[in-house]
Image (cartoon, rainbow, N blue to C red):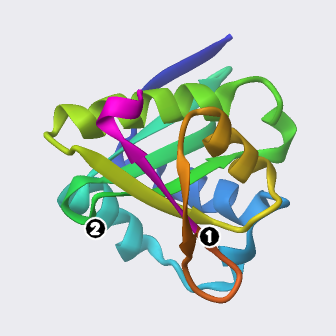
């Protein structure tokens, strides 16, 4: 059974491990350190985790101040179970509760993540760097 809860600072090592383990993640080469997670979870926004048998297996992080979803990652062993969609539901609802009318995210085109976002109503908003596309979700599209 999968359980969902707000992320805690003690979860950061698991979040970093999951981010490094995913198969479709061109951003894995970026240096994203512990301090970046602390900033995202405590100053810029909030994260939610998915747990299976007491182990964090996925997470999502939204940053209202930047009007974006900073991260969505599910451990490869737990892909295809609806965890990503459930996490997106949590963060989208929370971000709109913070007063946002729209939010953005970016991901590589042709990935499972892109297909998930498009199924959820996110709209392609153009290029966002070399190998990334930007997507936008407006509150009225939910």
Q: Secondary structure at mark 2?
A: helix
Q: Secondary structure at mark 1?
A: strand
Circle 2: is it few (<14), some (14-19), or many (20+) Cα within 10 Å? few
Q: Quadrant of residue 69?
A: bottom left
Above or below 78: residue 86: above
Instruction: Say which quadrant the C terminus sits in.
Output: top left
Residue under pointer 1: 133
- The disc placed on residue 15 is none
Quadrant in which residue 99 is drawn: top left
Mark 2 or mark 1: which comes first in sequence?
2
What residue would you read off at disc 2?
A: 39
The span shown in magenta is 134-142
Residue nearest the viewer, comparing 110 with 83:
110
Report x, y in % for residue 57. 67, 37
Q: Position of residue 51 (x, y in %)?
A: 60, 27
Q: Is residue 18 left or right of residue 139?
A: right
Question: Is 18 a magenta residue?
Answer: no
Nearest to viewer (mark 2 / mark 1): 1
Residue 132: image x %, image y %? 65, 75
The answer to which of 14 and 113 lies nearer the viewer is 113
Q: Is residue 70 left or right of residue 80?
A: left
Position of residue 107 measured from the top left corner of the image (x, y, whole percent): 64, 64
């Amino acid at each position: 059974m999968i359980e969902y809860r707000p992320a805690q600072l003690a979860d950061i090592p698991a979040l970093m491990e999951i981010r490094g383990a995913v198969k479709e993640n061109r951003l894995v080469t970026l240096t994203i350190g512990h301090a970046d997670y602390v900033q995202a979870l405590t100053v810029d926004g909030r994260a939610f985790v998915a747990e299976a048998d007491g182990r964090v297996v996925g997470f999502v992080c939204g940053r209202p101040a930047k009007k974006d979803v900073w991260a969505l990652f599910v451990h490869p062993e737990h892909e295809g179970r609806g965890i990503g969609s459930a996490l997106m539901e949590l963060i989208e609802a929370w971000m709109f509760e913070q007063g946002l009318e729209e939010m953005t995210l970016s991901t590589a085109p042709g990935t499972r993540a892109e297909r998930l976002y498009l199924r959820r109503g996110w709209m392609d908003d153009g290029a966002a760097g070399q190998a990334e596309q930007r997507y936008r979700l407006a509150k009225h599209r939910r």
